[in-house]
Image: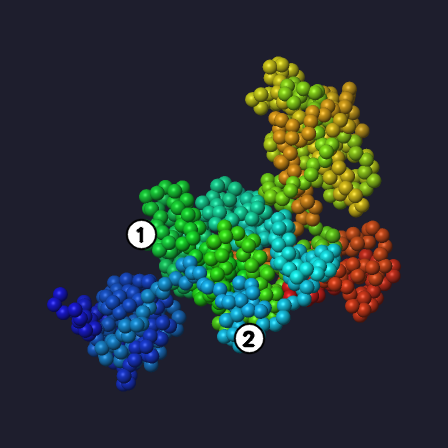
Amino acid sequence: MKHAFISFSIILAMVFTCEAKLTVEQRRQLPAAVADKVDFARDIQPIFEASCVKCHGRGKDNGGFRLDTRETFLKGGDSGPAAVAGQSAESYLIELVSGLDPDNVMPVKGSKLNARQVGLLRAWIDQGMTWDASITFAKPPPLNLHPRQPELPPAARGFEHPVDRLLQPYFAKHNLKPAQPVDDRTFARRVHLDIIGLLPSPEEMAAFLADKRADKRERLVAHLLGDNRRFAEHWLSFWNDLLRNDYKGTGYIDGGREPISTWLYAALFQNKPFDRFVAELVNPDKPAQGFIKGIVWRGTVNASQIPPMQAAQNISQVFMGVNLKCASCHDSFINDWTLADAYNLANIYADETLELFQCDKPTGKKAGMSFIYPELGSIPAGANKTERTRQLAELITQKKNGRLTRTMVNRLWQKFLGHGLVEPVDEMEQPAWNQDVLDWLAEDLAANGYDLKRTMRLILTSRAYQLPAVSMDEQKHADYVFIGPAIRRMTAEQFRDALGALTGVWYPAAAKSLNLSVAQRSKEAPVTLPATLKWIWSEPDAVSRAPVETIYLHKLVTLFEVPTSAWATVACDNSFTLYVNGSKVTAGNDWNAPSLVDLRPHLKKGTNLIAVAAVNHTRDNKPPSDGRAAPDAERNPAGFIFVTKLQSKEKTTEIVSDQTWVWSRQKSPDWMKPGGALPEARPAVELGPPSLAPWNLTSALNDSLAMSEAHRDVRASLVASDPLTLALGRPPREQVATTRPSAATTLQALELTNGETLNRVLTDGAEKLLSDKAPSSRELVTTLYGKALGRKPTAKELKLAGELLGEPVQREQVEDLLWSMAMLPEFQLIY
């Protein structure tokens, strides 16, 4: 080409004849071009930003027209060029924005251009359409995507912690002098609720306050993070919200949805590295596949809610901080994501290539195959689905993807301090109010095995976390300045668990879909099994060659009171059915997986009968035939093992399988009921300890028995919602919920004043508090203040509460006091 430069006007004159169709009369009605000299940056750029870019900028090409750059503007769209220099009245752009043709007006959505704006555009066209080379409406480079390692500023007194060193320049820039950290009592309450979701007990609070070591706060954080069970129980709610997992609801009845509760609890209990955690959800085996499966809705379903599209939406939102929901229906109006972006990711999970549906209407176009950030890597279109999901998991969890760690760090910061480093937390294309803090914590997470507990410890031991809490009511995202953590409300689960700690009233049992005996595999020293625990059977050589038959076992247990907890662990080679006082409690047929069962509902004060039908199967695992003895050649190992710890107010009683049990091959019709007989009953034979071969069951029994601790005080995270937790903001989990509303509602006020669920907890709690002995009003008030608020009552509080209770203390007055304490801001808020 002879000339390297051709003027803007010449280029536009060379393009196709514009297709403006205004009549001569309509052209006379056009707003006149302004007489002033137009400046593109001052006059035209704001119009394009407000009215055109949402549909035609940031890489979008509605109608084939893109406004990204001067070049794409010159190219025009499906209807030809947008404008011809010097001819504004004949330009298609002016026709569209003028509104003179009511069937053809732009912008389609939002405010139409006024006469002044149309006049500016006309003048700009007539004056040659100059365009500042530095101005672009193209999609900007993604923020928070690529790894970046900031340097730590030098340490200073009071700013030794990495997070505080990074915040020091921020405070200096804003002329802020951080306040002194909160006192020990406030810190202990705050960190207990944040790490394990429970109030510190009076004993825990007293021990922490009495500790004189300089690093006692760091020690407390480490201790609570190491409490695997209570940590997992608390964070289960956070991840259930994010992964829209629950114990009941839409899809669970008809198989259109699968729970991941057991996998999730185990991952939290074990502190599974975050990159593995994500990879197992993106490319799942069966225990974790419910997240990707989503909800298979019944009936007619919008194209934006088919399971592959749900997978695309949920992966992008939860792990990348990207909202694809609008882009799943059409090019998004709230961000820069396009319909093609959403379908290209959804296509990875599709069994057949997806057709793009725009606003639920087929387009005839087929989706491509790519991640939302192609710069991180590609997914081969020809690969099968299994290979595609594997590669996607690798792509998302690679260290090159800095967005994964930044999204998670931001969620943790928001959870602990009430306001994210990036807000909203699902818009990670926004800049952080402190980029260095976000980047440093994210890079530290990636460099240290993706250990989320380490990141939590870094945040929780910073001075920033320990600053006095402040109200967020008057702060907006745009003008947010960090001066301390936000005052937060307890979550629904925290509030209900706090009531449990205060009243002793917890939930009766965890949800059945949450198999805690499988989920928990302790890294800690296992629970010590009773030394008297033995495998038992009918004859000494049963460990190698017991007959194929059913034997019946009895154990009588005398109780002076019904225990508060009675979880038993049971296993049998090959199968068993367990009865307590005539009621069938459970059955099992896999000795490798001991059954954990709650005996308490079936026990009574006085004599109790534990009865078991224990079966030894054939060598090919078939039960014995009725009335026919199996040949001796079918003899094989057989054994039964049972252990329970009965918890009462005063002591723990262990019941184990040993020679005190009796057995028989005969039974009476009511053999499993109290008073029922076992003809010719004989003492059981002890075969050996739990470690006895071929079973070697010590570890599995330890794990199962350890889970009885989790069942002792069943928390709100382990059960389905009730009216109280729903009213307090627990989401239904049919959509991803990354944050919960903080504003109080009328429904919450009604539930807290007249709700049956809360009333039942308070009534049962009052009865429990009065069941041991009749405490004085002073004793009861002091006890409740210690449990609820972590302190003793003031003299005025003691007087007022004592007057409310009266002497002797009655149940109704205790209910009133419990309700009054539960309504205190000091109880409900995290300061």
Q: Nearer the viewer, residue 602 or 101?
A: 602
Give the crowd class for mark 1: few <14, some 14-19, many >=20 residues within 10 Å.
Answer: few
Q: Is residue 638 above or below residue 450?
A: above
Q: Is residue 695 left or right of residue 649?
A: left
Applied colour scheme: rainbow
Residue 763: x and y in percent read 76, 55
Q: Is residue 333 above or below residue 28?
A: above
- Residue marked by disc 1: 364
Residue type, label 1: Gly
Residue 762: x and y in percent read 74, 56
Give the crowd class for mark 2: few <14, some 14-19, many >=20 residues within 10 Å.
Answer: some
Which one is earlier in the sequence, the residue at label 2 or at label 1?
2
Q: How many marks?
A: 2
Q: Which secondary structure, mark 1?
A: strand
Q: Nearer the viewer, residue 150 or 636?
A: 150
Q: Which mark is residue 176?
A: 2
Q: Nearer the viewer, residue 270 or 762?
A: 270
Residue 290: x and y in percent read 50, 45
